[in-house]
Amino acid sequence: MCQFCHQHGEGKKWYLQAKNYSDDLLSDMSRRKFIERFAKSDPKLLTRQSERLRKLDKLPSLIRGLAARLFTRRMKKVHFGQVVPIEEIEQILGFVNSITRVACVCRRSTLGKEKRYCYGISLAPDGGEFRRIVTKADSSFAAGPDLAGLERLTREQALEAFRQHEKEGLCHTVWTFYTPFIAGICNCDRSDCLAMRATVTHAVPVMFRGEWLARIEPKACTGCRQCMRVCQFGALAYSAGERKASVDERRCYGCGICRAACAAGAIRLVDRRSDEVASRLW
Ligand code: SF4
Ligand code: SF4
């Protein structure tokens, strides 16, 4: 299990621990201020962060590695994520009491437009303090060009939306706002999501891999390669000789997006701990 499961999970996966979504954690003023700043995020600020990541790549490897480790350590305290497959998203949606769809701050910066790929979640029936802070901090959530205010969803509507995101090849991730408080689930891809770019493209991790790992049943695999088209992590290889796909366990994040794309039903997710190599990679 990942570091946060050990620190904040009390024997469970940390993101399945209801107390990590509780409104009580919002009595911390520094956390409230961070959420306000986050909701107000200027797209230009995110563009600058992207440029910083590119500059980091040009540093000598020793300095680069040190800077990346320091950044990751800080982000683990403030805003860190983990990849979560759809069945566990369903479990989370099963115990939270409020689900609000909002515009993605990354896509505002990378695409210059609003894409509703992010979800605020809370145990409070009305969205609690989180919703109040976000609404106050960013009026564009309530009055954007193609928005009709913060959009409340039922569990069923939200789950259907997540299934749709999965079909679009987007990877589900949970996020802390001053760890261990979780208030958001995002749907990421490597091209538009800055967190995924930092983690995968620039090797500056701001999210853990999922607790899972993909496995392909060779007998069931037809060699169609559809799975390879959707994997955001470059974790699938193809053998022309065998006409089969296979998973590189060192790269797999266990998101399950390939599974959704496999018409042959040849892919399943297994516990990351069951694989000697993957169990040491987070
Ligand atoms: S999508 Fe399924 S059947 Fe097609 S190559 Fe991938 S594992 Fe094999
Ligand atoms: S191989 Fe499948 S489960 Fe693993 S990272 Fe790629 S899409 Fe996700």
Image: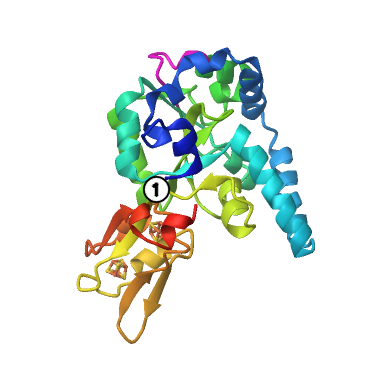
User: Compared with residue 49, is residue 146 higher up or lower down, i.e. above or below?
Assistant: above
Quarter, ligand 1: bottom left
Q: What element carries label 1?
A: loop
The crowding category of the residue bearing disc 1, from other C-alpha atoms within 10 Å (few below 14, some 14 to 19, many at least 20), is many
User: Compared with residue 223, is residue 200 higher up or lower down, i.e. above or below?
Assistant: above
Residue 267 x, y percent position in the rendering: 28, 61
User: Compared with residue 96, is residue 255 higher up or lower down, i.e. above or below?
Assistant: below
Q: Can residue 154 be seen in this view?
A: no
| Towards the viewer: 220 or 76 | 76
| Towards the viewer: 29 or 46 | 29
Quadrant hosting residue 15: top left
Q: Answer left or right for 54 relative to 266.
A: right
Residue 97 x, y percent position in the rendering: 35, 19
User: Compared with residue 245, is residue 40 higher up or lower down, i.e. above or below?
Assistant: above
Quadrant hosting residue 104: top right
Residue 45 x, y percent position in the rendering: 73, 39
Q: In which quarter of the image is the N terminus?
A: top left
Residue 136 x, y percent position in the rendering: 60, 15
Q: Mark 1 points at which residue?
A: 211
Residue 184 lies in magenta, yes or no?
no
Residue 128 lies in magenta, yes or no?
yes
Point 33% across, 39% down: residue: 88
Point 63% across, 47% down: residue: 110
- The boundaries of the magenta stretch are 121-129
Point 20% across, 70% down: residue: 220
Question: Looking at numbered disc 1 in the image, what kind of residue is underneath it?
Answer: Glu
| Towards the viewer: 10 or 251 | 10
